[in-house]
Image (cartoon, helix red, strand yellow):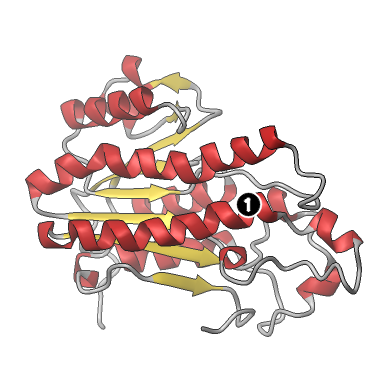
Amino acid sequence: MSMDPQQGYAGRIALVTGGRGVIGSAVTGALRARGAAVVCADSEGTLDGAHADAQALAATTLRLDVTDRAAIAALVARIEQLLGPVDLLVNVAGVVSFGSAQDLAEAEWDRVMAINLKGSFLACQAVMAGMKRAGFGRIINIGSVVGKNAGNARPWIDSAEQQRAGNVAYGVSKAGIHAMTGFLAKELAAHGITVNAIAPGPIATPMTTSFPEQLKALIPAGRMGTAADIANAALFLAARESSFITGEVMDINGGMLCD
């Protein structure tokens, strides 16, 4: 497939959740560099979307709690009012969690599921009507290799890895995102909307500073992934030319998992 990276993004209106993080910032920057108007939202945003004008919407990190359905709906309505309908949603917002299943607190399970899985669904739900009206849309969810491989840790070899390489709540939330992606892809395909997921392997971010060196050595590509690796995949899936790709969970893991 031949695609000019400068085409297909001018005039596009995107919403990126978790946009203040390393991956969200990379996705936002890549889209803006190609001419898209990108609304960047994050729990640590600096401005309430209800008080933003068109210029601020496309230039400021807005404050958003992705577990609040009303807040997401209000932000999407504000974007439609000032910029136009969202035709690209990238769900990056998420949290990690560590430790053993036996010690996992119920509150921690609920927190991870609410932000990672429920938050992604609510954002998808909020943009569906506008995309249907337009007859076009791209939704990209961020899953994870641990939603496929039952986690990177090898506690039967080194119990300490379990404390530094994620836990069951995170993996289940990401597996849920993969499943949700398929359901939405089928439901929305007839409306010109594609729904795909990116499943990163270990990515060098502040969230992975404790990732064990022994596990890094198991990545065939010989390095951790970068935020740019994920942003490039998002650009590909977001392109108009990628209209026949939907329901896909794209592995970006340096060969760590091949399926």
Question: Would residue 53 appear left or right of 140 to someone viewing this image?
Answer: left
Q: Is residue 28 above or below residue 195?
A: above
Q: Is residue 151 above or below residue 23?
A: below
Quadrant of the image occupied by residue 233: bottom left
Secondary structure beneath label 1: helix
Q: Residue at horizontal 78%, vertical 66%?
A: 153
Whole-percent x and y of residue 191? 11, 56
Whole-percent x and y of residue 40? 41, 37
Question: Would residue 214 appear left or right of 226 to someone viewing this image?
Answer: right
Q: Residue at horizontal 71%, vertical 49%?
A: 206
Quadrant of the image occupied by residue 187: bottom left
Whole-percent x and y of residue 93? 51, 43
Question: Would residue 184 appear left or right of 221 to someone viewing this image?
Answer: left
Q: Which residue is mark 1?
A: 170
Depth order, front residue of 77/14: 77
What residue type is disc 1 on?
Answer: Tyr
